[in-house]
Image: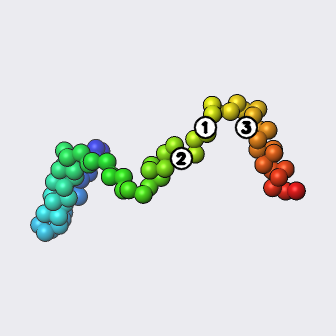
Amino acid sequence: MKAAEKLYQLIQILPESQINEVLHFAEFLQQKQLTPTPPPAISPGTLTGLRGIAKRPKATPSDSELQAEYADYLTQKYR
């Protein structure tokens, strides 16, 4: 049985007031589908405003340089 057929059978046994509720809900879903929702606005002060703040003044280091830098950091931290 398809969903539309099952829905039709269920609606047949409902009282008129509940049928109207189902109708309003179906119209709401149809309207929601027709009008696309805009993406949420990014409020000022979010992390997007900090883009580029941690950039290095020189070229991006290689993996081996990053590992050496991290090892140095850990050595200094746990002395």
| Residue type at tag 1 | Pro
Q: Which mark is residue 57?
A: 1
Q: Answer with the quarter of the image where residue 2 lies.
A: top left
Would residue 19 be seen by someone viewing this image from the given angle?
no
Q: Regarding mark 2 in the picture, which secondary structure is present there?
A: loop
Kindly state the secondary structure of the residue where label 3 is placed: helix
- 39 lies left or right of 14: right
* Label 3, residues with CA under 10 Å away: few <14, some 14-19, many ≥20: few
What is the quadrant of the C terminus in the image? bottom right
Which mark, residue 53?
2
Question: Which amino acid lies under the numbered mark 3 shown in the image of this protein?
Answer: Leu
The N terminus, quarter of image: top left
> Does the rendering let one see residue 65?
yes
Q: Secondary structure at mark 1?
A: loop
Count of number-bearing discs: 3
- Distance of label 1 from label 2 (alpha carbons): 11 Å
Q: Residues within 10 Å of mark 1 (few under 14, many from 20)?
A: few
